[in-house]
Each structure stands twice: as C-alpha cells, then as structure tokens.
Image: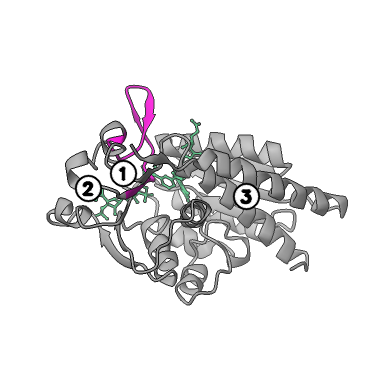
Amino acid sequence: MGKILDGKALANLLGENLKEKVKNLKAEGITPHFCVINIGDDTASKIYVRSKKRKAEKLGIIQDIYQMPADTKQQEVLDLIDKLNTDPEINGLMVQMPTPEQISADELLARIDPNKDVDSLTPANVGRLWLKDHFVEPATAEGIMALLKHYEIPLNGKNVVIIGRSNIVGKPLAALMLEKNATITIAHSKTQNLASLTKRADVIVSATGEPCLIKADMVKDGVIVVDVGINRVNGKLVGDVDFDAVKEKASYITPVPGGVGPLTVQFLMEAVVNLTRRQNGRK
Ligand SMILES: NC(=O)C1=CN([C@@H]2O[C@H](COP(=O)(O)OP(=O)(O)OC[C@H]3O[C@@H](n4cnc5c(N)ncnc54)[C@H](OP(=O)(O)O)[C@@H]3O)[C@@H](O)[C@H]2O)C=CC1
Ligand SMILES: Nc1nc(=O)c2c([nH]1)NC[C@@H]1CN(c3ccc(C(=O)N[C@@H](CCC(=O)O)C(=O)O)cc3)C=[N+]21
C-alpha cells in the first residue's frame, strides 16, 4: 500500500512560518488584503472560498469575497476589477474559475493588474513563468512541487503525465516540472487511449473534475499519484482517482480531501503576502 502524501500537514507546517511573516508585516502597520471574485455557484469554487476564509482568518490576512450571480454581465465584473486594481488598500485579487458562459474569463484576467495577480493568470505573469521568472507563484502547481519536495521525490528524468490542460493547473505545473527536468505529457479530453500513457508514467497528476477517471488497471506498480480533482459525489468530497484501489499499487498518493487542496490555499496566501511586501517596497 502506498504512502499518503499529507498535504494538510505540510500546509499547516508552512502556515506557521507564514503566520510569523504576516505578524511582522502587521507590526509595521501593513495588513495583507485581497479580494476573491466568484461568479455563479460552482461546487469546487465554494469549497475553495470556504477553505480560504478559514486560512485567512488563521493568518490574519483580510479576504473580501465578491459573490456575483450567475447572470452577471461582463461589464459589471470589468468595472469591479478596475476598482480593485486602483484601490491602494487592496494588495491582490482573483477571479475564480470556471465562469458562466456569457463571461469571457480571458478578458477579465487580462484586465487584472499583474502586480495584484495572486493567481498568476494574467498574460504578463503567465509569460514570465514560462521564462522561469516566478513573479507570482501559481498556487496549485507550487503546492504540488512543495509536496513532492517535502517527501523527497525527485523529478529529474521522470515521465510525468498531467491530465488536464487548464491555465490554473495543467499548464503552470508543466512549466514548473520542466524546470526540474521531468519529461511531461499533457493529456486532455481529446487524448486517445489515456491508459496507454498513464501505464508508462512514473508520476500521474490528474486535474479533470472527473470522479474515478484513474483506475487501478491504468497505472503501473510503484507509481506516484497526485489527485487535484475536487468533486462532490453523493455529498462526499472525492478527487479524480479511484483512491482505494489505486493506493494499493502506488508508492505515494495524495488523498482528497487533505492532499493538494490545503496546499493551494497555503500558496495562494503566500502569493498575497509576497505581493503585499513588494507593493510596500520590501523584498
Ligand atoms: N485541489 C486544488 O487545489 C484544485 C482543484 N481543482 C479541481 O481540479 C479539477 C480541474 O480543474 P481545472 O483545471 O480548473 O478544470 P478545467 O475544467 O478548466 O479543465 C479540465 C481539464 O480536464 C480535461 N478533461 C476533462 N475530462 C477528461 C477526461 N475524461 N479525460 C481526459 N481529460 C479530461 C479537460 O480537457 P479539454 O481541455 O479537452 O476540455 C481539461 O483540460 C476540478 O475538479 C477543480 O475543481 C482546480 C484547481 C485547484
Ligand atoms: N482562479 C481559480 N483558482 C483556483 O485555484 C481555483 C479556482 N479558480 N476555482 C475553483 C478551484 C478549486 N480549488 C480548490 C482549492 C482548494 C480546495 C481545498 O482547500 N480543499 C480541501 C477541502 C477542505 C474541506 O473539506 O472544506 C481539501 O481538499 O482538503 C478546494 C478547491 C481551487 N480552484
């Protein structure tokens, strides 16, 4: 049976350090303050908002939530982003994905001031990341890298299959793993014969939102499995991986909940603090 990669424990550990950092900033009269824009009622987004609220309170960071109805107009969101961009009290902002269909997420993201882009999703910060300039660390990808590092799992020369090509998870993770000399395959919904790819993988990262996509017969013995998916099935939180069966073959595996999620929240807060420090002339 595989060893559990305990993201929750690592997030708590790293949180202690960050709490000190926030405390020191506060002693200088600076309180990190960021805003979350959530349009509609995506399940995973709601869980994320709840998790962030808990963590921000613990750390002493101010988080405002702008919950907008599913039929919100594009212009209303653009106006809100403009307002937050120019408000000197606000250090960071983010728009949660997915957005409803009348909304162009790309246009919203391009509108965010890259200096306040806690999610690293603006065109400027995406470009920087692929040029190995970590101006803002993308939270989920950074959380996964921290987890592998904590358990001393090397990526050098490893075959990694990332399932999902989103701007939030798949693409930035590929950039970070390439820097560590992994060989990356990115699969998606049009990929043919996914199992033939995953069976050869040393490391599988699944970020699709498809419960039970990864089954035991799709992985080799000793595989390392990172499950990013956040799904609600019969009122229970599950990932993309058939956890109970796959864990028997894996050498390491992340649970859901308690795996990647808490680390995403931790690194999002790190991004907020880092941007706040930079805006106040600190390194
Ligand atoms: N734990 C955490 O910290 C986080 C969790 N999440 C969760 O991770 C999941 C993915 O999020 P996100 O990247 O934003 O989602 P998106 O919906 O933007 O992307 C999903 C990706 O999965 C691919 N995909 C969907 N179904 C299949 C399939 N059957 N086989 C292969 N590929 C498939 C899609 O392919 P195509 O491009 O062709 O449509 C797409 O590339 C969600 O459950 C989300 O809630 C997200 C961020 C952080
Ligand atoms: N712009 C944007 N960036 C994102 O990173 C983003 C997004 N939009 N939209 C929604 C998804 C989903 N997501 C989660 C992150 C952490 C948990 C999390 O903390 N999960 C806990 C759950 C704790 C509980 O049970 O409440 C866990 O897995 O242990 C969940 C979901 C980020 N996403």
Horizontal placement of 68 versus 213: left or right? right
Horizontally, residue 61 falls left or right of residue 80, namely right
Residue linked to disc 1: 250
Separation of disc 3 and disc 1 at Cα? 31 Å
From the viewer's perspective, tell me whether residue 63 is left or right of residue 43.
Answer: right
Q: Mark 1 near mark 2, Cβ–Cβ under 8 Å?
A: yes
In the rendered view, does 242 fall on the left or right side of 69? left
State the image quarter where residue 117 is shown: bottom right
Amino acid found under the numbered disc labelled 3: Met
Residue density around tag 1, few if under 14, some if 14–19, many if 20 or more, within 10 Å: many
Residue found at x 55% / y 52%: 94
Looking at the rendering, in which quadrant would you find the C terminus?
Answer: bottom right
Work out whether residue 154 or residue 179 is closer to the camera in this orientation and state it: 154
Seen at 32% across and 42% down, the residue is 209
> In front: 33, or 200?
200
Q: Which residues are magenta?
A: 224-243
> Which mark sits nearer the N-terminus, 3 or 2?
2
> In this figure, which residue is indicated by the disc labeled 3?
269
- For mark 2, what is the residue? 219
Q: Where residue 248 sits in the image (x, y, percent)? A: 28, 36
Above or below residue 21? Residue 111 is below
Q: Earlier in the sequence, mark 3 or mark 1?
A: 1
Magenta stretch encompasses residue 231:
yes
Using the numbered discs, state the Cα–Cα distance from disc 1 to disc 2 in whole angstroms.
8 Å
